Image (cartoon, helix red, strand yellow):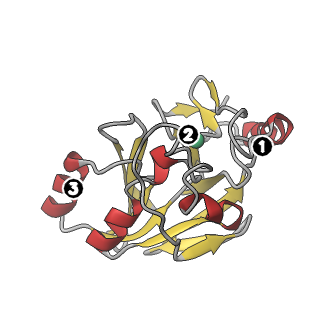
Amino acid sequence: MLDLIKKFESPTIASNIYLIRDAATKKYAMIDCGGVCKEMDAYIAENNAEVEYILLTHGHFDHICAAEHYRNKYGARIVISEEEEEFTSNNTLNLSNLFGCEMNPFKPDLLLKDGQTIMVGESEITFKLTPGHTIGSGCYFCDGNVIFTGDTMFSMGFGRTDLPTGDPSQLQNSLEMLYKYKGYTIYPGHGERTVIC
Ligand SMILES: [Zn+2]
């Protein structure tokens, strides 16, 4: 069980960074990190937070830009889907070239397959591949009714499909899969959370 889901905003790009905490062990994971966030750093310092994982929903720069920084700072392991691995070292795929954002390539520590689980303390997080926005976009399911959706699904819409590896028909399939989770709360990569109804 989680006892904390805390949202921060990356200061330059307005993408969400979440910190989640396992209730039993007080271990943390970060979900996406599109920039260095002083407010989150202050929270982590004040709470002596032990961040075990950096769970990336997909490889666009506004979700991964600070992953290497935070891996070095907190000793966390970077996790992304295996389909998305190339994004972490290809500045055309991750759009940092397009948006004129400087990003150093990095290697993830762990590559996920569809359905794979990760333990954050005693909380089980399940990764489901939801391609369409990018080929290896995915969502993290936790606590029975919580989904971190990245740019696959927002409170009022869904992610673009006109960027490299995007595919509208794949996204439609992914959204249809997600719409089956009625009553679940989604925490998207941009904007506010909502409940699937
Ligand atoms: Zn994206």
Residue with the mark numbered 3: 41
Give neighbour class at mark 2: few <14, some 14-19, many 20+ (Cα, 10 Å).
some
Q: Earlier in the sequence, mark 1 or mark 2?
A: 1
Which quadrant contains ligand 1?
top right
Q: Earlier in the sequence, mark 3 or mark 1?
A: 3
Image disc number at residue 9:
none
Q: Give the answer, above or below, for where 39 lies relative to 115.
A: above
Image disc number at residue 185:
2
Quadrant in the picture for residue 192 = top left
Give neighbour class at mark 3: few <14, some 14-19, many 20+ (Cα, 10 Å).
some
Residues 72 and 44: in front is 72
Q: Position of residue 195 (x, y in %)?
A: 58, 32
In the image, what residue type sits under mark 2? Thr
Quadrant in the picture for residue 140 = bottom right
Spatial CA span between label 3 and label 1: 33 Å
Residues 74 and 139: in front is 74
Q: Give the answer, above or below, for where 79 lies relative to 188.
A: below
Whether the residues at callouts 2 and 3 have beta carbons within 8 Å, the answer is no
For mark 1, give the secondary structure: helix
**Residue at x 72% of width, y 34% of height:** 161
Residue with the mark numbered 1: 174
Residues 56 and 85: in front is 85
In the image, what residue type sits under mark 3? Asp
